[in-house]
Image (tube, rainbow, N blue to C red):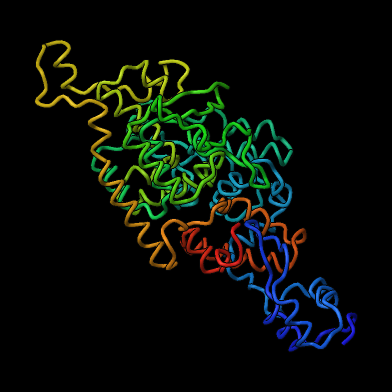
Amino acid sequence: MPATIKLSTDQLKELHKIVKPILDNKGNITGWRGITEAKEHFHVKTRQTIYNWLEKYPRPPERELRGGVIPKKVLEFEETDAWKLLKKHKYSPEIKNSLMQAWEMLDKTDPATWTISQIESLRKEEINGKHNELWFQETDDIAPNHAVNLRRALKGLKAENVHEKLLALENVKKGGAGKRKEWFMETEDIHKLIGEIRDLNVLTYLRIGLECGGRPISLAGKTDSRGRPFPHELRLTVDKINRTRHAILRWENKKKVWARAKFQDSTLDFLDKYIKDHNIAPDGDIFPFNQDHYHEKLKSAGIRAGIVMFKKPGTGAYTLRHTFATQGLAHNLSIESVMEQGGWETADVIMAYYAGLKEEKLDLEFLDIKPDVTRTWKSWIGQFDQHFKDQYQKILTEIVSRKRIPTAVVQPKVFRGYSWGWVKGMLDHPEKIRPATLLVWRKAYKMHNEGKTDLQIRHEMGWDKKNAT
């Protein structure tokens, strides 16, 4: 059978039953298994013939995933002139969410043709007799985040009268600073949240973030379009742990300085176990995903736990920072200590957003009335130790049971996880991707949208068996 022959559908199916792709952790084909078996099966002279066929037919002849998985409304919006101009915008994901909601409220009028009166109507509680989805009850106005995204869209469209249209969204009211004082968890909320965590790395992130108050970007970093962390300092690696000083070195990207946050011994012991169980190298990343991943995971866990606060826009990974500052001040940490631990530049933000004095503290300072129980920060944060240990063991047992492998190799040595934002970006530009790679990642992304964990996806796709990456 010559290498140039056009294989039939049945022959292609046969070929791909025998030969399987070897994928790296980004879904790229790095090689093939079963080349020799295929050579013998098809009675060809060289292995190169099989490679030639695979280069021409990198995937089996199966039906592509139907576009019907994308809601009709989304497909319709993506056909508007406005979105065709804005889809490559720097802030396209944020813009799309706000713009599509506004487009639907305005009877699906193409945003490129909006009038000033239509834009002004977005600041009213009702539009055409329907509740305005962009409305923010607390300020009696359009939500500030939606206003920002719509202004970005209008600037990107460069439409007629753009200056006047931007003025229609100026001076949008913002929620008072006091509103964010509610963005912290009480003791019972934290216990509920721990019980809803399903991934070991998310559980560890919760414990570290709760105790140090670091910004999400300083703990998990952000990634570029290829999934690489930047700047390099944002990688929270094992070698940044200093047991002698009970501290973890953390890069404060906003201040461009290093911070040395202090941790309880029990927390560092917990972290040591996590590192050992995951075989993380001395210069390896403690958290394999970026800040967006942990924001989404904590938010969904908080909603499952029934914590009402997590239904508010903006709550998620950042809630740990608010909780640290609020509870730290309530449990006898000085403002100076809170500032140093969490990386705040001045006390102004802490006083505006977190420092709400409780009545028993006022009674103590003004009337010398001592509370029944004086609880220090160490005792308050220490009360969660056992719950963290129990939940860790529960998750670990489930993983070991599912994979039927020894605890010491629960997760491959260099497994870095998946950046779903990167995957979505890749799937949005299928013309740049090999068909085989595209098919594989579409299947994985569908599992992700169905709510499966990254470890479940890795296992079901068979990636944990094919190679260590």
Q: Would residue 386 appear left or right of 78 to someone viewing this image? A: left
Q: Can I make out residue 251 in this image?
A: yes
> In x, y percent, where is residue 117?
59, 40
> In x, y percent, where is residue 202?
43, 47
Name the foreground residue: 184 vs 146: 184
> In x, y percent, where is residue 277?
43, 51
> Looking at the figure, which quarter contains the N terminus?
bottom right
Q: Which image quadrant for residue 78?
A: bottom right
> In x, y percent, where is residue 81?
72, 52
Q: Which image quadrant for residue 333?
A: top left
> Looking at the figure, which quarter contains the C terminus?
bottom right
Name the foreground residue: 26 vs 405: 405
Q: Would residue 82 appear left or right of 142 to someone viewing this image? A: right
Residue at image position (24%, 32%) is 380
Q: Which image quadrant for residue 68?
A: bottom right
Residue at image position (41%, 16%) is 348
Residue at image position (72%, 47%) is 88
Residue at image position (41%, 42%) is 272
Q: Please determine whether, in this image, residue 47 is positioned above or below residue 157.
A: below
Q: Please determine whether, in this image, residue 151 is positioned above or below residue 9.
A: above
Q: Can I make out residue 174 in this image?
A: no
